[in-house]
Image (cartoon, rainbow, N blue to C red):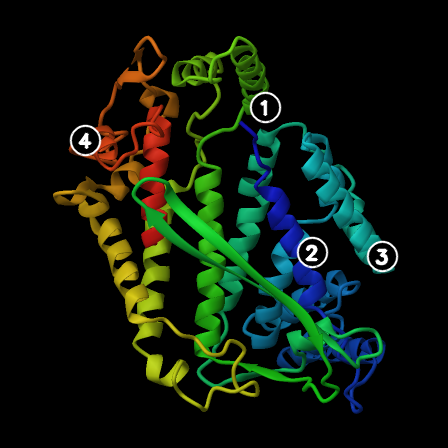
Amino acid sequence: MKQKIFWLPVMSAVVASAITFSGCTKSSSNSQSPGASQAKADKLAKDGKHVESAIEYARIGELLMMPEGFQYADQMFAKALAEDPNNAKANIYKSITEPMMTAKGFIPKVERLITSEDDQQGLERLRQNINALNMPELSQFSQGMVQGDKPFESYYDVQRFAREKLLPAILKSVDYLNHVDASQPIQMNFTPTRALLDPVRNQTSYYSYSSNCNQDPTTGWNCTQYTDQGSYSDPKLPNVYHIDQHDLKIMKMSMMAIADQIRLSTAFAFKDIEFAIRRLKALDQVRRDAGSDGLTAQDVVGVIRHYNRLFTLETDNQLSEIAKSTSQVLKNGIELANLKSTICDGTDRTADNSLIRPICIEASMVDSLQIGLDLLAGPKEVTIGNDEDGNINIVMDVNAILNHPPKDLKDLLPTTFDANGNPMSYPDATMGGLFPNGDIVNKLKLVGATDRVQTATDATNSSLQSVKGHL
């Protein structure tokens, strides 16, 4: 019953982005210093030459895109967009720095909520790693809260932060990218690769992460992670790269997917969940001390029902936005797949004319993208497993749960239990309309999920994982 703070890895990734995406690009011999460039930009703005001043401000921000400087870079990009809202370079960089700025002071904000020893050690390692960089501005950014901010006291505080600050920042990022005309490749005088160089600029470190997931009828979704890291010498790295319309589409898709994840994570309140977790942990220990197997479904449901505010629908939820947003992401993916010969198999997408290369969406992935679109279009029959007689299918209506979500998820929990604490009946067999035929529990039993389906929420989660796999 360990509750993870979903915001912590997001903020860690933001700081990592600040370190890995940012890099000093002062190597260009004909570049002016940021101070001289700003004086020039200010004069152009005063003279009403808005397009020219925006170009200067954007270039200053680009020079400041380094771990200790991205806060100031963000200010320059804002100045550029105030002069010219369509400045491509400023819009692209602002889409990156905008969500970064919401992370200010994230370490002291979350540390009160971290109770497990592993998470505490992880946070301390992050703090030490940042301090070891010897970058005062970055240390202050991560460990000094904005005046008026307070540490998070509950998981609900984290939810509200994500909903009220992080989500708007991500949506702004999408809007910035929508202002970019990438019909012709846009030159950026900075390369992410250089950000990984050591201080003497003679070696590049690299780190890669990937995962492979598959669905097993018995154990559900299983994922294997792969990592690789090392270094190589390459003193002749370029200090320019280009963004074209395909790169831009991938960037927007990524931002939209993050926004939908936040929408989903903040739709139902986590009010008092920390108290429920403590009670469940204590009850689990009591059960085990008495020689039983620990918590039963009846135990979990009983504790959850005790907290009236837990898992209630937020009035400002954006569940209805998910279908529209996700549909666009899926359509974009199919469009990119149709261009496979150009953006995956083609040889003219190089480091000099594209940010992301290659972009390869294989035929098997297209099938999953299409299934996702079908699910969002209306009721759809999907396969959730198989038995000796063949596939076991179930009808799902994703829009029902997104457009007309239950006011309280506790209303979906089982109401009667057998002598062993296993659920016997549910108030709504359709789980809020997600499974309109009302056969989800029986179907999951057929695929060997009897032991795992202990509560209605477990059943719903298993099926939503299936949807996630398709989407």
- In the depicted view, which residue is nearer to us: 183 or 116? 116
Residue lying at 45% horizontally and 26% vertically, measured from the top left: 311
Badge 2 local density, few (<14 within 10 Å), some, or many (20+)? many
Question: Is 256 placed above or below 284 here?
Answer: below
Badge 2 amino acid: Val
Badge 1 local density, few (<14 within 10 Å), some, or many (20+)? some
The label shown at residue 106 is none
Of labels 4 and 1, earlier in sequence is 1
Badge 1 amino acid: Glu
- In the depicted view, which residue is nearer to us: 389 or 76? 389
Q: CA distance from mark 3 to mark 2?
A: 14 Å
Tag 3's secondary structure? helix
Residue lying at 47% horizontally and 79% vertically, measured from the top left: 182
Q: Pointer 3 and pointer 2: residues touching (CB < 8 Å)?
A: no
Residue 408 in sight in this render: no
Q: Which residue is mark 2?
A: 15
Q: Pointer 2 and pointer 4: residues touching (CB < 8 Å)?
A: no
Of labels 1 and 3, earlier in sequence is 3
Q: Which residue is mark 4?
A: 439
Q: Which residue is mark 1?
A: 274
Q: CA distance from mark 1 to mark 3?
A: 33 Å
Where residue 381 appears, x then y in whole percent?
A: 17, 46
